[in-house]
Each structure stands twice: as structure tokens, then as C-alpha cells.
Amino acid sequence: MTKLPAEAYAIIEGKHSDPFRYLGLHSEGGHSVVRAFIPEASNVEAIGEHGETAPLERIHDAGLFAGALPNGSKRYQLRARFGENVVDLDDPYRFPPVLSDFDLYLLGEGTHRRIYDKLGAHPITLDGVDGVAFVVLAPNAKAVSVVGDFNFWNPLRHPMRVRGVGYWELFVPHARAGDRYKFDVTGPDGRHLPLKSDPVAFAAEIRPSTASVVVDESRIPHPRPAPSGINALYLSVSGLKGYCSHRQGRSGLPRAQCH
């Protein structure tokens, strides 16, 4: 097998802080090369934009594959064989970033006003492919992977990349609402930590289970606004029950103005 660079071994060992630098589509020597790390796959092919295929060479027994794309395609899929099963996959490492540079700027200075729209797990469509965008803040971590129902909880399948001041992100194609997930974190001293639930998750399993759950926020029912004519606020202060207008109630003092 070909002698591999240090970045390849960082991918294999789950220690790379930016797997996009090695995995996915790259131009080398005037040629397009795609690399994929798919543990337990025996064979992998690249599928070009028009359905043409090209085999990828297995360059490490751990499941690292590389090769040229058919006809120089820019968009591609991967076809992997697992025993008797053949699966077509969208490569997570061919997609653009989840967070914009402006998001990173606001998050870095602590002024982002919709942090719940950026961190956590959000079903989105990216480059025409449905999936889930995962983002978690772990400024002291050396490596972070997202694990869940979509990858058999294998921490080697979806390593994330760090951006800004410690925001780890990855778009996972075909993950969906209802999937359970956690984050696999390597600490600053290189130790593997217990799996971590998402602190910004919209849902979680009922204890004693502790996994976070992907939620499609667009399907969450929202309370109907109160009729515009209602301006009474019910109070109970020092045993006195009554109601005041909204303006009166804001004082918190149910005096003679209240009824």
C-alpha cells in the first residue's frame, strides 16, 4: 500500500480536527482525487454526475479509500459494499460549511441572537440533499464526532471539523428527525470522554436513557396568539385575587385600580 501522510492516520485514529482537509474531493497534480473513510466497507466506488462509476483503491485496511472521479465530476456519490449489501452514500465531506463566516463572527463575540437556530441538530437541505446539520461548542476538545442511529453509533464514521473559537460542525446526509444522537469527544489531554448529550437539543430520550433526539422545528405546534381584545391580567397577591389591566398589573400592586 502507498505510504500515507500523518493526516491520513489522524483520520483513521479519529484525531483529526478538520477532516475536510483530507477527506472529500481534492485537486492534486492537476487531477481530481476523492478520499473516503468508510470502516467495514470491503469495496467503494465513486459515482459521477451522470451515473458513471470508478473504483476507489483501498489505501489502508481500516477502511480508507482513494481514487480519481469518473470524467472529472464535481458532484458525486459513493457506492460501498458491506458484506452482501451494497449502499449508495452521499459523502458528508463534499458539502459546504454549515456556519457562515458572519455566524462565526457573532458567535465568537457572543452577540448572536438566534443561537438556537445554529447550534444543536437542524434538519436542512444542502446542495439538494436532505440531512441534518450538527453544531456543538467544545472549545477545549481535540476531536469531536457525531454518533447516532444514522451511523450505528460508530465514532469513526462522522468526525466533525472545528471552526471559529471551538464550534464543531458537520452536515450528515440522510439523517432525519427522530434519529437519536450524541457527541463523541476527545479531551484536551487526548483522553476519550464518555458520550455527551447535546446541550442545545430540542428533545431527548426519557431517563434512564440520555440520547438527544433530532427534531424538525417546523413541525412543532406553536401556541395561538391571544385575541387582541384581551388586556386583563389575573393576579393573586397576598391572598387578594382579582384582575388588573396590563398596565396596572405590571406594577404588581393590586390596589384600588384593580377590580
Image (cartoon, rainbow, N blue to C red):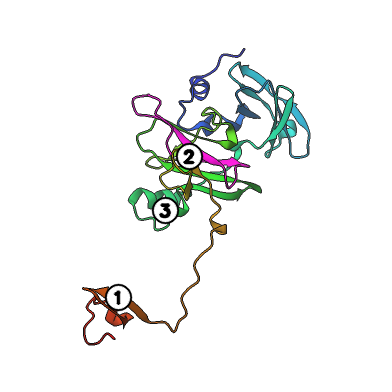
Decide: is 165 above or below 113: above
What is the crowding at mark 3: few (fewer than 14 residues within 10 Å), some, or many (at least 20)?
some
Q: CA distance from mark 2 to mark 1?
A: 40 Å
Q: Read off the residue under disc 2.
A: 211
Q: Which quadrant does the N terminus fall into?
A: top right
Q: Which quadrant does the C terminus fall into?
A: bottom left
Closer to us: 147 or 136: 147
Residue drawn at x 56%, y 43% is 96
Counting from the top left corner in percent of width and height, residue 128 is at: 66, 49
Q: Earlier in the sequence, mark 3 or mark 2?
A: 3
Closer to us: 78 or 1: 78
> Residue 51's image quarter?
top right
What is the crowding at mark 1: few (fewer than 14 residues within 10 Å), some, or many (at least 20)?
some
Counting from the top left corner in percent of width and height, residue 91 is at: 63, 35
Closer to us: 237 or 52: 237
The residue segment tinted magenta is 170-197
Q: Would you say 175 lies left or right of 236 here?
A: right
Mark 1 residue type: Leu
Q: Read off the residue under disc 1.
A: 235
The mark found on residue 134 in the picture is: none
Q: Is 148 contained in the magenta span?
A: no
Decide: is 111 above or below 68: below
Prevailing secondary structure of the magenta residues = loop
Q: Read off the residue under disc 3.
A: 115
